[in-house]
Amino acid sequence: MAISKQYRRERIKMRIRKKDTGLLPRLSVFRSNKEIYAQIINDAEAKTLVTASSKEKSFDATGNKIEKAKAVGTLLAERAKEAQVSQVFFDRNGYLYHGRVKALADAAREAGLIF
């Protein structure tokens, strides 16, 4: 029996979230075919603290998808500083740590987020 991509991703998501102790806010990443979204969530209060995406009107990065992901990571880290969030738990949401997900994470780290 073949395992679907969705089922595989759900299993990976559960494995990643199992490691989350709930002490730190969670940086969750979602990528669609065209756009990339990231948000920092406080699971204890069930509130989204900071959000950034490549679909926002104020977003002005051009280029390929990896360059847009880097810009989203930088934007998210800047907004996190304003919200006084410095350390997060990285939730790659079942995606491989490669390409756009890695670019977003590296840019957020360079801009000052700790994870």
Image (cartoon, helix red, strand yellow):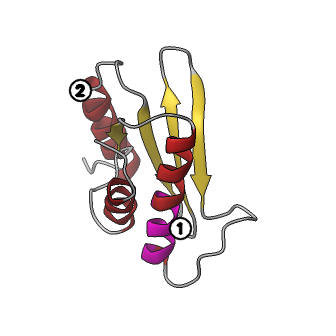
Residue visible at 35% across and 56% down? 105
- Region of the chain picked out in magenta, as a range: 66-73
Residue 29 is situated, as x and y percent measured from the top left of the image, at 45, 48
Residue visible at 48% across and 21% down? 43
Observer-nearest of 108 and 33: 108
Q: Quadrant of the C terminus?
A: top left
32 shown above or below 113? below
Disc number lying in front (2 or 1):
2
Q: Main secondary structure of the magenta part?
A: helix
Badge 2 marks a residue whose secondary structure is loop
Q: How far apart in space, not on screen, are marks 2 and 1 (Cα)?
A: 28 Å
Residue 9 is situated, as x and y percent measured from the top left of the image, at 34, 45
Q: Which residue is mark 1?
A: 33
Whichever of callouts 2 and 1 sits on the residue coming sooner in the sequence is 2
Q: Quadrant of residue 56?
A: bottom right
74 shown above or below 85? below
Observer-nearest of 97 and 11: 97
Q: Quadrant of residue 87?
A: top left
Residue 36 within the segment the image draws in magenta: no
Mark 2–mark 1 CB contact (< 8 Å): no
Residue visible at 25% across and 32% down? 15
Q: Which residue is mark 2?
A: 19
62 shown above or below 107? below
| Type of the residue with mark 1 | Asn
Observer-nearest of 44 and 79: 79
Observer-nearest of 13 and 90: 90
Badge 1 marks a residue whose secondary structure is loop
Residue visible at 76% across and 65% down? 57
